[in-house]
Image (cartoon, rainbow, N blue to C red):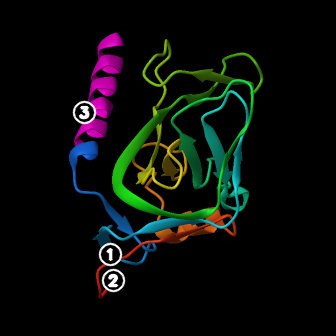
Amino acid sequence: MKAQILIRSTAFGLMAFLLGGCQTLVRESVQTGWAEIPPGSTLTLNRSVSIQPGRARAFIVDRGSRSAAGGDGTSCVLEVRRIDEDEGQTIPPGEIPITRVQNYVALVSGRLPAPGLDGGVRFQLAGHGDSGGSQMIRQGYHFWLDDSHDPNLMRMTCLGRLDDPAYTRAPTLAEIRAVLGELATLDVVLPAGR
């Protein structure tokens, strides 16, 4: 049993490492082909974004895209480099160049029914379990942001729904734009013909 967990954890770690070094490709929608995000793409914050004291992220979640099975839909977070324990932080509105895009795979704890608790839910760390279970993942992207707009602003990370590895996928640009809504505009310069 421990050998299976070790093999599974090693395989997912290797997959995340290999994806991190590969060319990053995105899709405009589920129906379109894959394209690389070239230089010149931007994220425009249409209004300021607040980050709570003691936090490094501002969460942006599309509550309307949650699947019927209870998996999380597409979500994004704006991340800063420095945490202020005492005061909230504000990221000002403006256009921010995207310096690079990186594939990202988040290993997430699985939700497993606890035996004998009449449908109760138990959480466990991915890859650490006494009863097996499946590892859940969220695929997505890190959009690394130019720090000339705000030296503390680091990146925007967008993830697809939480699911088993065979059933999940990274979000499309259309899904990311839906999550951002009126808060921000993602302007991706795609090659002609896409």
**Coordinates of residue 72 in the picture (x, y in percent):** 62, 48
**Coordinates of residue 10 in the picture (x, y in percent):** 28, 25
Crowding around mark 2 (Cα neighbors within 10 Å: few <14, some 14 to 19, many 20+) is: few
In primary-sequence order, the first of circles 1 and 2 is: 1
What residue is shown with label 3? 14
In primary-sequence order, the first of circles 1 and 3 is: 3
Q: Which mark is residue 33?
A: 1
Q: For the magenta stretch, what is the residue range?
A: 1-18
Residue 55 painted magenta: no
Residue at x 70% of width, y 63% of height: 47
- Report the side of 135 relative to 120 (left or right): left
User: Eyeballing the image, is 113 above or below 177?
Assistant: above
Quadrant in which the C terminus appears:
bottom left
Residue at x 35% of width, y 50% of height: 103
Q: Please, what is the dominant secondary structure of the magenta stretch?
A: helix
Of residue 156 and residue 71, the one placed in the foreground of this image is 156
What residue is shown with label 2? 194
Alpha carbon separation for disc pair 1 and 2:
7 Å
Q: Are marks 1 and 2 in contact (CB under 8 Å)?
A: yes
Alpha carbon separation for disc pair 1 and 3:
26 Å
At numbered mark 3, what does the secondary structure look like: helix, strand or loop?
A: helix
**Coordinates of residue 169 in the picture (x, y in percent):** 43, 55
Residue 5 painted magenta: yes
Alpha carbon separation for disc pair 2 and 3:
31 Å
- Report the side of 145 relative to 194 (left or right): right
Residue at x 65% of width, y 31% of height: 55
| Residue 82 occupies quadrant | top right
At numbered mark 2, what does the secondary structure look like: helix, strand or loop?
A: loop
Q: Are marks 1 and 3 in contact (CB under 8 Å)?
A: no
User: Eyeballing the image, is 101 above or below 151?
Assistant: below
Tell which residue pokes out farthest to the right in this image: 118
